[in-house]
Image (cartoon, rainbow, N blue to C red):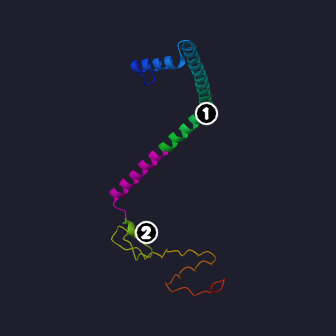
Protein backbone atom coordinates (compact mmCIF):
# COMPACT_ATOMS: atom_id res chain seq x y z
CA UNK A 1 0.00 0.00 0.00
CA UNK A 2 1.63 3.17 -1.23
CA UNK A 3 -0.13 6.55 -1.07
CA UNK A 4 1.57 9.45 -2.90
CA UNK A 5 4.92 7.71 -2.62
CA UNK A 6 4.50 7.26 1.15
CA UNK A 7 4.62 3.70 2.41
CA UNK A 8 3.24 2.38 5.72
CA UNK A 9 6.49 2.92 7.63
CA UNK A 10 6.75 6.56 6.53
CA UNK A 11 3.07 7.13 7.36
CA UNK A 12 3.59 5.88 10.92
CA UNK A 13 6.58 8.20 11.35
CA UNK A 14 4.51 11.16 10.08
CA UNK A 15 1.66 10.33 12.50
CA UNK A 16 4.06 10.07 15.46
CA UNK A 17 5.67 13.43 14.58
CA UNK A 18 2.22 15.03 14.16
CA UNK A 19 1.11 13.60 17.51
CA UNK A 20 4.18 15.08 19.18
CA UNK A 21 3.86 18.55 17.64
CA UNK A 22 0.05 18.92 17.53
CA UNK A 23 -0.86 16.96 20.62
CA UNK A 24 -3.45 14.27 21.19
CA UNK A 25 -6.31 16.77 21.78
CA UNK A 26 -6.02 18.63 18.46
CA UNK A 27 -4.91 15.70 16.23
CA UNK A 28 -8.46 14.42 15.41
CA UNK A 29 -9.60 17.96 14.46
CA UNK A 30 -6.48 18.46 12.31
CA UNK A 31 -7.11 15.15 10.53
CA UNK A 32 -10.76 16.12 9.88
CA UNK A 33 -9.68 19.51 8.51
CA UNK A 34 -7.14 17.89 6.20
CA UNK A 35 -9.72 15.35 4.98
CA UNK A 36 -12.27 18.14 4.32
CA UNK A 37 -9.69 20.17 2.39
CA UNK A 38 -8.77 17.15 0.27
CA UNK A 39 -12.49 16.53 -0.51
CA UNK A 40 -12.97 20.17 -1.57
CA UNK A 41 -9.91 20.09 -3.79
CA UNK A 42 -11.16 16.89 -5.45
CA UNK A 43 -14.61 18.45 -5.94
CA UNK A 44 -13.16 21.58 -7.55
CA UNK A 45 -10.79 19.65 -9.78
CA UNK A 46 -13.62 17.31 -10.77
CA UNK A 47 -15.87 20.23 -11.73
CA UNK A 48 -13.05 21.87 -13.68
CA UNK A 49 -12.38 18.61 -15.53
CA UNK A 50 -16.10 18.19 -16.31
CA UNK A 51 -16.33 21.76 -17.61
CA UNK A 52 -13.20 21.27 -19.71
CA UNK A 53 -14.61 18.06 -21.21
CA UNK A 54 -17.89 19.86 -21.95
CA UNK A 55 -16.06 22.66 -23.77
CA UNK A 56 -14.03 20.13 -25.76
CA UNK A 57 -17.18 18.22 -26.80
CA UNK A 58 -18.90 21.47 -27.80
CA UNK A 59 -15.85 22.46 -29.86
CA UNK A 60 -15.83 19.06 -31.58
CA UNK A 61 -19.52 19.43 -32.44
CA UNK A 62 -18.97 22.95 -33.79
CA UNK A 63 -16.02 21.92 -35.95
CA UNK A 64 -17.34 18.55 -37.16
CA UNK A 65 -18.62 20.01 -40.44
CA UNK A 66 -15.38 21.88 -41.10
CA UNK A 67 -13.31 18.81 -40.30
CA UNK A 68 -15.35 16.71 -42.74
CA UNK A 69 -14.86 19.37 -45.46
CA UNK A 70 -11.11 19.46 -44.86
CA UNK A 71 -11.03 15.67 -44.90
CA UNK A 72 -12.78 15.68 -48.30
CA UNK A 73 -10.34 18.30 -49.60
CA UNK A 74 -7.39 16.27 -48.36
CA UNK A 75 -8.77 13.12 -49.97
CA UNK A 76 -9.27 15.02 -53.25
CA UNK A 77 -5.70 16.28 -53.16
CA UNK A 78 -4.42 12.81 -52.42
CA UNK A 79 -6.41 11.35 -55.32
CA UNK A 80 -5.28 14.11 -57.68
CA UNK A 81 -1.66 13.63 -56.68
CA UNK A 82 -1.94 9.88 -57.12
CA UNK A 83 -3.52 10.21 -60.60
CA UNK A 84 -0.92 12.80 -61.65
CA UNK A 85 1.88 10.52 -60.51
CA UNK A 86 0.38 7.59 -62.40
CA UNK A 87 -0.04 9.74 -65.54
CA UNK A 88 3.59 10.89 -65.30
CA UNK A 89 4.80 7.30 -64.90
CA UNK A 90 2.67 6.21 -67.85
CA UNK A 91 3.93 9.07 -70.03
CA UNK A 92 7.51 8.29 -69.08
CA UNK A 93 6.99 4.61 -69.85
CA UNK A 94 5.35 5.45 -73.20
CA UNK A 95 8.20 7.77 -74.11
CA UNK A 96 10.80 5.19 -73.12
CA UNK A 97 9.16 2.44 -75.18
CA UNK A 98 8.78 4.75 -78.20
CA UNK A 99 12.44 5.72 -77.98
CA UNK A 100 11.57 9.31 -78.82
CA UNK A 101 12.94 10.85 -75.68
CA UNK A 102 15.73 13.28 -76.62
CA UNK A 103 18.44 13.67 -74.03
CA UNK A 104 17.66 16.39 -71.51
CA UNK A 105 20.70 18.45 -72.57
CA UNK A 106 19.35 18.70 -76.14
CA UNK A 107 16.03 20.02 -74.88
CA UNK A 108 17.33 22.61 -72.49
CA UNK A 109 20.53 23.75 -74.21
CA UNK A 110 19.99 27.23 -75.65
CA UNK A 111 21.39 27.71 -79.15
CA UNK A 112 21.77 24.01 -79.83
CA UNK A 113 22.95 23.50 -83.39
CA UNK A 114 20.62 20.68 -84.36
CA UNK A 115 18.71 17.74 -82.98
CA UNK A 116 18.02 14.36 -84.51
CA UNK A 117 14.36 13.95 -85.42
CA UNK A 118 14.33 10.16 -85.14
CA UNK A 119 14.58 9.50 -88.92
CA UNK A 120 18.34 10.00 -89.11
CA UNK A 121 17.95 13.51 -90.52
CA UNK A 122 18.78 16.68 -88.73
CA UNK A 123 16.36 19.42 -87.81
CA UNK A 124 17.26 23.02 -88.69
CA UNK A 125 19.22 24.90 -86.05
CA UNK A 126 17.13 26.05 -83.15
CA UNK A 127 16.86 29.75 -82.46
CA UNK A 128 18.82 31.05 -79.53
CA UNK A 129 16.24 31.22 -76.78
CA UNK A 130 18.43 32.77 -74.13
CA UNK A 131 16.50 35.76 -72.93
CA UNK A 132 18.12 38.66 -71.23
CA UNK A 133 16.04 40.01 -68.43
CA UNK A 134 16.17 43.75 -67.79
CA UNK A 135 17.97 45.01 -64.75
CA UNK A 136 15.85 47.16 -62.46
CA UNK A 137 15.58 50.62 -63.95
CA UNK A 138 17.04 49.66 -67.37
CA UNK A 139 15.10 49.00 -70.58
CA UNK A 140 15.09 45.41 -71.85
CA UNK A 141 17.89 44.38 -74.23
CA UNK A 142 16.87 44.01 -77.89
CA UNK A 143 16.45 40.48 -79.21
CA UNK A 144 19.26 39.10 -81.40
CA UNK A 145 18.81 39.59 -85.12
CA UNK A 146 17.45 36.65 -87.13
CA UNK A 147 20.54 36.53 -89.35
CA UNK A 148 22.84 36.07 -86.35
CA UNK A 149 24.23 39.61 -86.49
CA UNK A 150 24.69 41.45 -83.25
CA UNK A 151 21.98 44.00 -82.43
CA UNK A 152 22.77 47.65 -82.78
CA UNK A 153 24.01 49.20 -79.53
CA UNK A 154 21.58 51.48 -77.76
CA UNK A 155 22.22 54.20 -75.24
CA UNK A 156 20.70 53.65 -71.82
CA UNK A 157 17.69 55.85 -71.14
CA UNK A 158 18.83 56.85 -67.68
CA UNK A 159 22.36 58.02 -68.55
CA UNK A 160 25.71 56.84 -67.22
CA UNK A 161 25.94 55.17 -63.86
Total residue callouts: 2
Q: Secondary structure at mark 1?
A: helix
In which image quadrant can residue 47 be found? top right
Location of residue 23 in the rendering, given as x and y in whole percent from the top left corner: 53, 15
Q: Is residue 79 magenta?
A: no
Location of residue 48 in the rendering, given as x and y in whole percent from the top left corner: 61, 25
- Chain part drawn in magenta: 80-101
Query: Which is more toward the observer, 144 or 66?
Result: 66
Q: Which mark is residue 63?
A: 1
Check disc 1: other Cα within 10 Å, few if <14, some if 14-19, many if 20+. few
Check disc 2: other Cα within 10 Å, few if <14, some if 14-19, many if 20+. few
Query: Which is more toward the observer, 71 or 98?
Result: 71
Front tag of 1 and 2:
1
Left or right: 65 in relation to 127: right
Location of residue 148 in the rendering, given as x and y in whole percent from the top left corner: 49, 84
Q: Secondary structure at mark 2?
A: helix
Specify which label sits upstream in the sequence, 1 or 2.
1
Mark 2 lies on residue: 108
Q: Is residue 81 magenta?
A: yes
Cα distance between the residues tagged 1 and 2: 49 Å
Query: Which is more toward the observer, 103 or 45?
Result: 45
Left or right: 140 in relation to 11: right
In which image quadrant can residue 63 be found? top right
Amino acid sequence: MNFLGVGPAELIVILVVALIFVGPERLPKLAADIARTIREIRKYTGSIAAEFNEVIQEFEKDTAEDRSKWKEIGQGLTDASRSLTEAMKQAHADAATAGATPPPAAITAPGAAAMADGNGTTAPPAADVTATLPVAGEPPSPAPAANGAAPAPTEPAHGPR
